[in-house]
Image (tube, coloured by chain):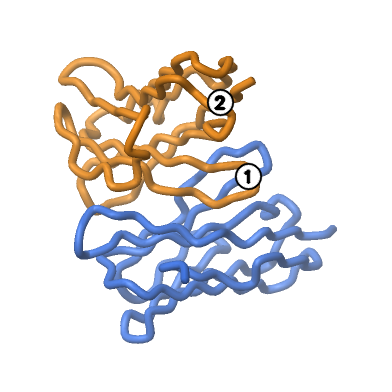
Amino acid sequence: NAGVMQNPRHLVRRRGQEARLRCSPMKGHSHVYWYRQLPEEGLKFMVYLQKENIIDESGMPKERFSAEFPKEGPSILRIQQVVRGDSAAYFCASSPGMVGTQYFGPGTRLTVL
Amino acid sequence: KNEVEQSPQNLTAQEGEFITINCSYSVGISALHWLQQHPGGGIVSLFMLSSGKKKHGRLIATINIQEKHSSLHITASHPRDSAVYICAVNSNTGNQFYFGTGTSLTVIP
């Protein structure tokens, strides 16, 4: 039973480019969470999704960031027109229900040059 | 003020020592989580609690709902326990998930 998969593990982008981060939840999990960890800071909640629905995006920056979790395929966190301040580790977690143990992916480390 | 406060921020212990990490929170919660983040960055969920106490191997987690406080204990600490331990809570008024800033533990052989 594979764990939560994230890819790519490392992503380098130049300012103004787009970054797409993918998260495949554990089998049977329909709840996905995205978190961001800025350098030398703690984890921050970004968005909570269920299949085809955004349940809570209160932690997402208002511009340039979007997330989806389609019926088929992985969840995608998309950052348009990246800036240096977007450099961070982005973690995805999945759970079988709304309140339950969350299983974390290995993270995607985004570096914006 | 953060919704979740942890102490201490940094902790160094000798191998074999009993370790306690504390977490206080200020919001109503449906569950509290203890996470472990290793130097490589990977995050592992250690415990999810809504009441009482849980034990897994040398790790024990307790929660006092009335006092809004949780503790993580490590018995017979070992250098491989060196990591950042993070307390996080599910808010009971929405889907928010609040994190403490973490406790960096170093266990010296």
Q: Residue at x 25, y 16 (%)?
A: A73
Shown colour of chain A: orange
**Element marked by disc 1:** loop
Task: Verify CB contact (< 8 Å) between mark 1 and mark 2.
Answer: no
- Mark nearest the camera among 1 and 2 is 2
Quadrant of the rendered image containing residue A84: top right
Q: Residue at x 38, y 47 (%)?
A: A45
> Badge 1: how crowded within 10 Å, few (<14), some, or many (20+)?
some
Callout 2: residue from which chain?
A
Q: Residue at x 50, y 16 (%)?
A: A16
Tell if the residue under mark 1 belongs to the same chain as the one under mark 2. Answer: no
Callout 1: residue from which chain?
B
**Element marked by disc 2:** strand
Find residue A110 and report its horizontal and vertical position in percent: 56, 25
Q: Residue at x 22, y 45 (%)?
A: A56
Which chain has been coloured blue in this picture? B
Q: Nearer the viewer, residue A32 or A79?
A: A79
Which residue type carries mark 1? His
On screen, residue A7 above or below B90? above
According to the image, label 2 marks what residue?
Answer: A110
Q: Quadrant of the C terminus of chain B?
A: bottom right
Which residue type carries mark 2? Leu
> Badge 2: how crowded within 10 Å, few (<14), some, or many (20+)?
many
Q: Nearer the viewer, residue B93 or B19?
A: B93
Residue B89's disc number = none
The answer to whether residue A81 is left or right of residue B75 is left
Q: Nearer the viewer, residue B4 or B65?
A: B4
The answer to whether residue A89 is left or right of residue A76 is right
Find residue B44 and report its horizontal and vertical position in percent: 50, 45
Residue B38's disc number = 1
